[in-house]
Image: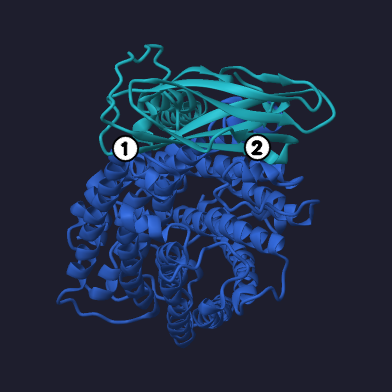
Amino acid sequence: MNNANSSLVVRLLAFAVGMFAFGFFVLPPMYEVFCEITGFGGRTNSSGQQVAETPDLSREIRIEFVATVNNYAPWKFEPTVDSMTVNPGKMYYATFDATNLSGEGRVGQAVPSVAPVSASEHFQKIECFCFDAQEFAANEERSLPLQFIVDPNLPEYVDTITLSYTYFESNYVTRR
Amino acid sequence: MADHGPDKGIKRWLYTTNHKDIGTMYLIFSLVMFFIGGSMALVIRTELMQPGLQFVHPEFFNQMTTMHALIMVFGAVMPAFVGLANWMIPMMIGAPDMALPRMNNWSFWILPVAFGILLSTLFMPGGAPASGWTMYPPLVLQTGDAFPFLIFSVHLMGISSIMGAINIIVTILNMRAPDMWLLKMPMFVWTWLITAYLLIAVMPVLAGAVTMLLTDQFFGTSFFLAAGGGDPVMFQHIFWFFGHPEVYIMILPAFGVVSEIIPTFSRKPLFGHDSMVYAASCIAFLSFIVWAHHMFTVGMPLSGQLFFMFATMLIAVPTGVKIFNWIGTMWRGSLTFETPMLFALAFVFLFTIGGFSGVMLAMVPADIQYHDSYFVVAHFHYVLVPGSIFSLFAAAYYWLPKWTGHMYNETAGKLHFWLSTFFVNLTFFPMHFLGLAGMPRRIPDYSTQFADFNWMASVGAIGFGLSQLIFVYVLLTCKKGAKATDRVWEAPKGLEWTVPSPAPYHTFDTPPVKRVAQEAFE
């Protein structure tokens, strides 16, 4: 193989290996950052900057709660109320009711998602059971607390925000 | 050198480093895969002939749709174009062989192994992969024992394609005849050069995506598992970052083939050769920034939807340039309609139908309605069957006399063309209506309102499948045909027509002199 060929082959191979590395090592973190910035994928506001409490009483937003248990795991998991009407800029409390239906201790983890995407960065959770894994004794029933505030800068065309939680068995949780 | 012949028997094929032998093996391999994938399509169409479940279990039906796609994409269309590249590119640029002949042998022989593995999954506990060729998690993670075999075979296909692509680029860039500067290269060579770069850019990304599936399943990562903080939608983004350039990998060489054939049978040089090159490059570039149009319904910010919609529609512009140039080539030419020309003309016409339905699918509001319906099935089958596959038939009929030294049976060829064209439309045209009426894809049973069009499509599919046996007949009887002249057709352009028919085992041991090259091109 002459020199011109081998140097071209080396460069093309390096390109192929580089594209593999791009796909495997660069795209996933890039996607993560992209989601954090845009709220894509139902991320909630996690900027760390708390939204100031400046209630806007002229506006009413409907918050809908959705709860799902992943993969038919032995849990009962439901919102205490299906929906509530809130004013932007005001702090609210809500609860979800969870029951361990099995006769042994279990650990669960809720993963949140907010829709529509344009609302996600304006929905801030001050306190949420989803921040930590939840430990349950056999057949324990418990109410899980949530404290949230809707940013008054929420785009005007949004009048409903859906907050959805999926409850996972914690042995399923590996990362984070 | 010139009297050096190949080994005898099986050794010739196992050890060969000759671009013509390897090209032949690629082409035969892809034809076999075309028939295997085609039989799977017939299982699908037989089940769908009537509403209700008649012949196969739904699980097996899903395995058929998945395997049909994987085999047709990676086993039939892609290797067939690599086979054409192997045979024709050295002869078109006046090179004695491919630049890396031993690697060439390897990149072919990986393929039967890869597809052996993939086909063996049909007999494994849990059956073959059934989650669609797109392998979306979390569904694909429910595949049975076949799962690691699916991933491994995709890896092997990727390695084979990347090696083939590197070989093609090195051959084209380093081994052209003197005085064949880049913009003078035939369109087939040009489109393959661009395709090869696309392959090197995206096959590794697919390899990365399926490797992440593998580690999610077996090594405790959660790239795509929501429970662990991952996101299944990310797989769709990575997959389609590969997947959209992939569809141009399957069509750009077809553009090249058609750009060779239409000038020959119009007896005019290709209209706008350079603009064709720029259009193909443009399509290749745009293919990297439109991937999310495959996933408008998974949820995306409005600005994202708008960007991907407009970028997608933009592709219609360079594609339009190509269609315009083919018509410009035929304009006031003295056309004759031998079989290769018929297939090329049908390509231009029917591919354009697929292109139009593509523009319809690019529109976000419309796509939300069409997504995952039979309209999508109609769209991509129009660009792949009367698109890519027809161009492959056109290429086979066009160069068969050069490969074998004999003219094929023209009557059988024409019969093959007319039956294929009739049945391909009977199969896929009604699918547009089914999709618009709301029939979802990838289902083994359907509401009775869809019965009539499905029956038509199934009859068409069986007819199309049987018509392909004529092609096998043409290949088997080719040796009995009249001796082909060296130029074969009336006044074809290109260096491949300056060598004898059949093309000797070694061609262009010495590069063509300038005069030969000029005669071939001007």
Mark yes or no: residue B471 visible.
Answer: yes
Q: Amino acid at mark 1?
A: Val
- For the residues marked 1 and 2, what is the alpha-carbon distance in whole angstroms? 27 Å
The colour of chain B is blue
Pick whichever, B291 or B21, lies toward us: B291
Q: Is residue B377 above or below residue B142?
A: below
Residue corresponding to mark 1: A158
Question: Is residue B322 rendered to the left or right of residue B2?
Answer: left
Taking depth in this image into account, of A12 and B66 the one nearest to the observer is B66
Measured from the top left, where is residue B278 in percent x and y?
22, 48
| Residue picked out by circle 2 | A69
- On screen, residue B60 versus residue A43, left or right, reads right
Display colour for chain A: cyan
Q: Secondary structure at mark 1?
A: loop
Q: Amino acid at mark 2?
A: Val
Is disc 1 surrounded by few (<14), some (14 to 19) or many (20+) residues within 10 Å?
few
Does residue A118 lie above or below A109 as drawn? below
- In front of the other: label 1 or label 2? 1
Q: Nearer the viewer, residue B437 or B387?
A: B437
Point out residue B92 in the picture as x, y percentages from the top left corner.
36, 55
> Which residue is drawn at the image coordinates 51% and 64% (left, top)?
B440
Which residue is at the front of the view, B217 or A65? A65
Q: Earlier in the sequence, mark 1 or mark 2?
A: 2
Residue B70 versus residue A79 in the image, above or below: below
Q: Residue at x 32, y 74 (%)?
A: B345
B506 on left or right of B49: left
Image coordinates for residue A109, horizontal then vertical, percent: 64, 25
A25 horizontally vs B491: left or right? right
Chain where mark 2 sits: A
Q: Residue at x 52, y 29 (%)?
A: A112
**How packed is label 2: few (under 14 Cα within 10 Å), some, or many (20 or more)?**
some
